Image (spheres, rainbow, N blue to C red):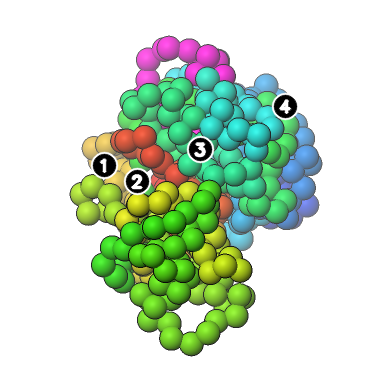
Amino acid sequence: MAVGGAIAGAGSGSGPGAAGEAVLGAVEGLDGPARLVLLFPSEDVEPGRAAAEAVAAAPGAAVAGMTCSGSLPAADPPDSAHCTALALGDAGSVGVGVAEHASRDLRAAGREAVAGALREAGDGPGEPLLLLFVDAAAGDQSDAVAGAYEATGAAVPFAGGGAPVHHGAQFGPDGAGSDRVVAVMLRWAGPVGLGITHSCRPRSAPAIVTQAAGRTVAEIDGRPAADVYLEALGVTGRLSDADFEEFAALHPLGQPELRGEVRLRHVLGRTPEGGLACATTIPANAAVVFTEETPADIVPSVSDATRAALAPLDGATPRAALAFDCAGRKWALGDLVEREMAAIVEGIGAGIPLAGGFTSGEIGRQRGAKGDRNHALVVVALG
C-alpha cells in the first residue's frame, strides 16, 4: 500500500469527538489523501469511539496506534489534547499487522504482527522503520520486541510503546482492541532518525542479581532484593508499600551495557518476601546498578533525544515526528510536564507535524536485539 503527497499533517482534539477532531486536523494538513493515520488518544477516551471517529475522518486510510497516559502535543505552544494524530500521505510504503491474544505468547505475537506488516509493506525502496504498539498488561514487553526482531533482523530501527495496563487499547485496521500487538512497517522515502534518552543517574557500584523468577528479582548479592535496593539508595527508615512504589517511580534499576550506557528497568513495587517486582525480566547473574532521576533532570534530557533523531537529516527540516515518553517521567514532573512538552516541540522544530503519547514502557532500538525501554523518551524524525 503506497503512502504520500504534501506528506504529513498532525492534529489534536480535546473535547467530545477528540479523536475525530485530531484526525481531521491531521488530514487537512496533507495535499492529498491520507494513507496512514497514527492515533494516540488519552486513556479517558473510549477506544471504540476513537477508532470509529478516525475511520470517518480519514476514509480509506489505514489506522494504527494506541491509547496513552496522556497525549503529547501536536501544537506550539503545547496544548492539553486528549488525542493527537499524525497523517501520512504518499512517501513510501506501509504495512500494518495485528496479532491477537498476545498474553498467550507475547514473543510469538510480536513476530506474527511484524510478519504481517512486512508482507503488506513489501520489499520496495525507502528507509525502514518499525512501529510497535503493545498491551502493557499482556506480559513482558521485551518478549514482544524479541519476536519483532526475529521477523525484521538487525537492519530495521524500532519505536513505539505500551498502552496503559488499565483501559489500554491498540488500534489496527479492524478497530480498537486489547491483548494484542499492532505493528506498522514503514518504508519512508526520506531519511529516518531515531533518538533515545533518559535522565537517570547511577547511585551505586554494580551489584549482582543472585535469584530471580520471571519479572521478580528475589535476591541481590545474596540478600532480599528490596533491602539491598533501599540501602544502596540511602533509605534507612521503613516505607509503606505505597511510599515504596512512589519512591521506586524515580529510582529504576539499571543494567550496564556497552559504551557505558544503562538499560533501565522500572520497579513496580516489592513482594511480600522482600523481592522487587519489575516491569521486565532481569535474569539471575545479571549486573544491576541503582539509579535516580529528579524533575530537574528530565526536561534537559529531551534535547539529547531530539538532537539524535534529527542528526540523520543533515540539517534538513523534518516532514513529521513521533514521540513516545514514559508515563513515569510525566508523573515525576507533575505540573512541570508542559515544560517537557514544549522542549520536545522546540527540539523538533515549531510547526513540524508531531504526535505521540505517554506510554507504559517505551520501545526504541537502533542496533542490537534489545529495544524495550523504561523511563525513556523515544523520538522519531521523518525527513
Which label is found at residue 143?
3
Q: Determine crowd level at label 2: few under 14, some 14-19, many 20+ residues with C-alpha closer than 10 A.
A: many
**Residue at the disc numbered 1:** 311
Q: Secondary structure at mark 3?
A: helix
**Residue at the disc numbered 4:** 174
Q: Is residue 300 above or below residue 316?
A: below
Disc 1 + disc 2, Cβ < 8 Å: yes
Disc 3 + disc 2, Cβ < 8 Å: no
Identify the image quadrant of residue 221.
bottom left
Q: Is residue 248 magenta?
A: no
Task: Residue 91: tell me if it is visible.
Answer: no
Q: Secondary structure at mark 1?
A: helix
**Residue at the disc numbered 2:** 195
Looking at the image, is mark 1 or mark 2 earlier in the sequence? Answer: 2
Q: Quadrant of the N terminus?
A: top right
Which residue appears at 23% of the width and 37% of the height?
314
Identify the image quadrant of residue 251.
bottom left
- Residue 114 at x, y percent in the picture: 52, 25
